Amino acid sequence: MNAFVKQALAGLRVLLVLTVITGVLYPAAVWAVSRLPGLHANAEAVDTTLVAVPRDGDRWFVARPSAATLPASGGANKGELNTDYDAVVAQRRAEVAQREGVGEAQVPEDAVTASASGLDPLISPAYAALQVPRVARENGLAPDVVRRLITDHTDGRSLGFLGEPGVNVTALNRALDAAK
């Protein structure tokens, strides 16, 4: 058998194996996991802390901005050199600074930029700390109580070294409900 035929057969075998893995096994596994008990109740999705659940009003911690509308998810393909995107970020920065009563330079980047899916429930500890005075005041809680809630709902780096620490806003707002 010549080298061309050997390479073609090897390529065909790899194609078939990867087609079975990515086209059959992986989708079947995702489908099976979605059917596990506890993920659905009465044919409706169960509330989760894996998705940012926005709440209206100044009493709550605010998640990252999102262009997504539930149940859909999606981001934008505009980058930092896009003037439209720059204007949106500048407007968000001004709004956050006004809401929190701080200078625009104090607003963390995650307060003005959306996550890739637009549904990420995590914010930086800096953004959570920026919101403490407003949330404490609006809920009639001591700032130290609110800071403790942030600490309790801050996740460290994955595997101890991947990514950045994050505060789960959905879980934090639920804990805020319970703290009152």
Image (cartoon, rainbow, N blue to C red):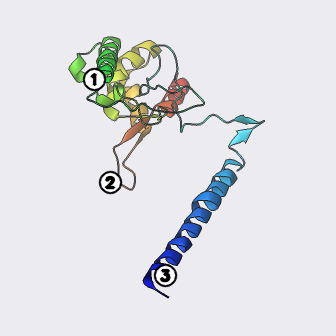
Residue shown at 42%/30% (left/top)? 76
Mark 2 nearby-residue class (10 Å; few <14, some 14–19, many ≥20): few
Residue shown at 59%/36% (left/top)? 48
- Measured as percent of width and height from the top left, residue 9 is found at 53, 77
Residue shown at 33%/44% (left/top)? 164
Residue shown at 40%/51% (left/top)? 158
- Of the numbered discs 3 and 1, the one sitting upstream in the chain is 3
Image side of residue 47 versus residue 87, left or right: right
Taking the view exactly as shown, the residue that stands out farthest to the bottom is: 1
Q: How many marks?
A: 3
Figure check: 153 above or below 66: below
- Measured as percent of width and height from the top left, residue 161 is found at 32, 54
Say which residue label 2 marks: 161
- Measured as percent of width and height from the top left, residue 116 is found at 43, 36
Give residue 107's mark: 1
Give residue 6's mark: 3
Mark 3 → mark 2, Cα distance in angstroms: 43 Å
Q: Tell me the element at label 2.
A: loop
Image side of residue 79 versus residue 56, left or right: left
- Measured as percent of width and height from the top left, residue 83 is found at 28, 21
Mark 1 → mark 2, Cα distance in angstroms: 25 Å
Figure check: 158 above or below 152: below
Mark 3 → mark 1, Cα distance in angstroms: 60 Å
Mark 3 or 1: the one toward you: 3
Name the amino acid, label 1.
Val
Name the amino acid, label 3.
Lys
